Image (cartoon, rainbow, N blue to C red):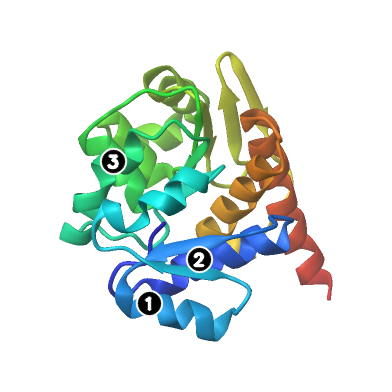
Amino acid sequence: MGGGYGYAGAVHLAAEAALNSGAGLVSVATRKEHALQVHLLSPELMGHTVEQISDISELLSKATVLVLGPGMAQRQWAKRIWPALISLDLPRVIDADALNFLAETPAYSDNWVLTPHPGEAARLLQCSTVDILQDRYKAVRTLQEKYGGVIVLKGAGTLICAEDEVYVNTTGNPGMALGGMGDVLSGIIGSLLAQKYSLLEAAKLGVYLHGLAALITRLL
């Protein structure tokens, strides 16, 4: 779910990543202006127009996993549908602008994976990015205590936290510091959740594979 004005590429990247990492059926709920683009670029994706949450009520009733946020943008379109999306009891990956909405109206769940970069983490904890970077381990633990679920604090040596466990990812390279990389990661994690991996397993494996793909690409 995402793709506000000017950000259609973000939700498309997430959806393609989900397909390419094993999801069987991927639906993209986005603005009317972008639904056709999804069909044209990737016929294997199911594009759905959403202006009100009622537009996708049937789709949501069949969903097994939700990825919220890629390219969502913080505009009225997203603000209209956010309250209903955050209340759903499905495994969810919360990324990008969905994290900014969560920072404005904090909530707790044991059934989601949050994937903030340091700037988003700072907004979630109402502190500065410098504070996050000075002690990333403390930050990821505090995020988990406040919001629940599994936290993926992105960066060099991405941290994954579930309750009192913190894991460090060792794959990846500086070439991943590009727009769209986070969207791809959210799609991969969402795909793994759909394949019945636990929240923690999906987060750890998703981050690892994401970085490994970057390492392999660099060798080509």
Count the marks: 3
Task: Give the residue drawn at x 73%, y 41%.
Answer: 205
Q: Secondary structure at mark 2?
A: loop
> What residue is shown at x 39% (from left), y 53% (from top)?
69
Q: Which of the numbered marks, if any, corresponds to residue 208?
A: none
Residue at mark 1 to residue at mark 2: CA–CA distance? 17 Å
> Which of the marked residues, 1 or 2, is nearer the chain's N terminus?
1
Question: Compared with residue 178, is residue 104 higher up or lower down, i.e. above or below?
Answer: above
Mark 3 vs 2, N-terminal side: 3
Q: Amino acid at mark 3?
A: Ala
Q: Position of residue 119 (x, y in %)?
A: 36, 46
> Can I make out residue 1 in this image?
yes
Amino acid on which the number 1 mark rests in the picture: His
Query: How many C-alpha atoms fall within 10 Å of the one at disc 1: few (<14), some, or many (≥20)?
Result: many
Q: Which residue is labeled 2 in the image? A: 180
Crowding near the residue tagged with mark 2, few <14, some 14–19, many ≥20 C-alpha atoms within 10 Å: some
Q: Which mark sits nearer the N-terminus, 1 or 3?
A: 1
Q: Nearer the viewer, residue 62 or 19?
A: 62
| Location of residue 169 in the rendering, given as x and y in whole percent from the top left corner | 69, 39
- Tell me the CA gap for discs 3 and 2: 26 Å
Work out which quarter of the rendered image holds the C terminus and state it: bottom right
Q: Residue furthest left?
A: 76
Kindly give the residue lying farthest to the front in the view shown. Answer: 58
Q: Nearer the viewer, residue 32 or 74?
A: 32
Looking at the image, which is closer to me, 82 or 205?
82
The residue labelled by disc 1 is 34
Amino acid, disc 2: Gly
Q: Are marks 1 and 3 in contact (CB under 8 Å)?
A: no
Give yes or no for contact between labels 1 and 2 (Cβ–Cβ under 8 Å).
no
Marks 3 and 2: CB-CB under 8 Å?
no
Looking at the image, residue 50 lies above or below residue 135? below
Q: Which residue is mark 3?
A: 84
